[in-house]
Image (cartoon, rainbow, N blue to C red):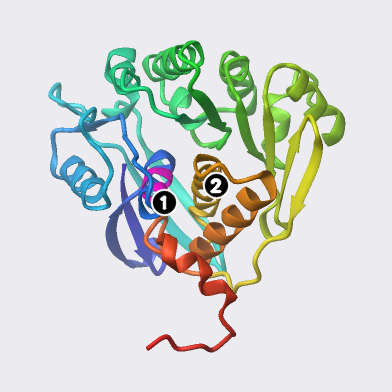
Amino acid sequence: MAALLAHGALRLGGSLGLSVAGAESNVAIGLARLGHRVRWAGRVGADELGALVLRTLRAEGVDLSHAVTDDTGRPTGLLLTEPRLGTLTRVSYYRAGSAGSALSPADVLPALAAGPSVLHLTGITPALGASAAEAALAAATTARDAGITVCLDVNHRSRLWTADRARAGLRPLLALTDLLIASEDELPLVLERPGEQEAEAVRGLLAAGAGEVVVKRGARGATTFTADGATDRPARRVDAIDLVGAGDAFVAGYLSGLLDGADVPARLDRAVTTGAFAVATRGDWEGLPTRDELALFDEPDGTTIR
């Protein structure tokens, strides 16, 4: 998507900045900055906003050989972010009838032919429409059959679909998921019995086939659950400026650790570090670190690097 970033109240004529956004794009950029080879499969409109999305991803080192430009007149999706109170931000989506909502299995399956290590999906894609939901399910099925790790970040967007629709739409993907990531408030969406306590719920998810369940806890850090037990990691202490995109930054860090063969504590450490970079800067992805910047949090406060 393209993203319009408001500065000041829009109804009072606040100004707008233009960037790009999208959970999968944020994760792709985060992984590319950390030195991983990343391929993005998606659909944009044949318009200037679509060109901006592709140009930005390409500039960040993301492989776009499987990106599709829609030639049917569907526009590139758009979101509008409006800071309202401190770090509270209001987000509006303009994605109905967008190029991304017409994503199809034919758009994404060729990207899996080269045998990637991980397929990353979010719950946003199936929320866009029947075609996009079919594409996500086909990709997960193909990846599972090929032995590719399937990562699903629930990433619920209440303005795109209701909790009941999300629960029904995510159910087919869960059976194919190796690594499930959800925030605490999203966890009920992937449970057969939403009223379950967290520990019982996670045991059920692991028993159903997930190898890892990662629960994001915001400023309180995160927990990874596996058959061997639970591993906690507190969040990095940082002055928060913009929380939008923090979850995607966390996912990029976690997947980076997974791709590097790191153990669970090290994956969590990298994930909370990349998440801290995101909240300390404005924008969804602009502040994401390169690999050599990960150690900056170990420098004393007030350090100037010359």
Comes first in the chain, label 2 or label 1: 1
Is 1 contained in the magenta span? no
Q: What stretch is highlighted in magenta?
A: 27-31
The image quarter in which residue 132 lies:
top left
Q: What residue type is labelled 2?
A: Gly
Q: What residue type is labelled 1?
A: Gly
Which of the numbered marks, if any, corresponds to residue 257? 2
Tell me if mark 1 has few (under 14), some (14-19) or many (20+) residues whose alpha carbon lies within 10 angstroms of its own. Answer: many
What residue sits right under mark 1 in the picture?
Answer: 30
Whether the residues at callouts 2 and 1 have beta carbons within 8 Å, the answer is no
What residue appears at the point 33 percent right and 16 percent down from the top-left corner?
A: 109
The image quarter in which residue 282 lies:
bottom left
Number of marks present in the image shown:
2
SS assignment at label 2? helix
Which of the numbered marks, if any, corresponds to residue 185? none
Residue 247 horizontal/vertical position (percent):
55, 49
Q: Residue 30 or 148: which is nearer the viewer? A: 148
Q: CA gap, disc 2 to disc 1?
A: 12 Å
- Left or right, residue 126 beside residue 69: right
Q: Which marked residue is nearer to the observer: mark 2 or mark 1?
A: 2
Q: In which quarter of the image is the C terminus?
A: bottom left
What residue appears at the point 86 percent right and 28 percent down from the top-left corner?
A: 200
What residue appears at the point 42 percent right and 17 percent down from the top-left corner?
A: 139
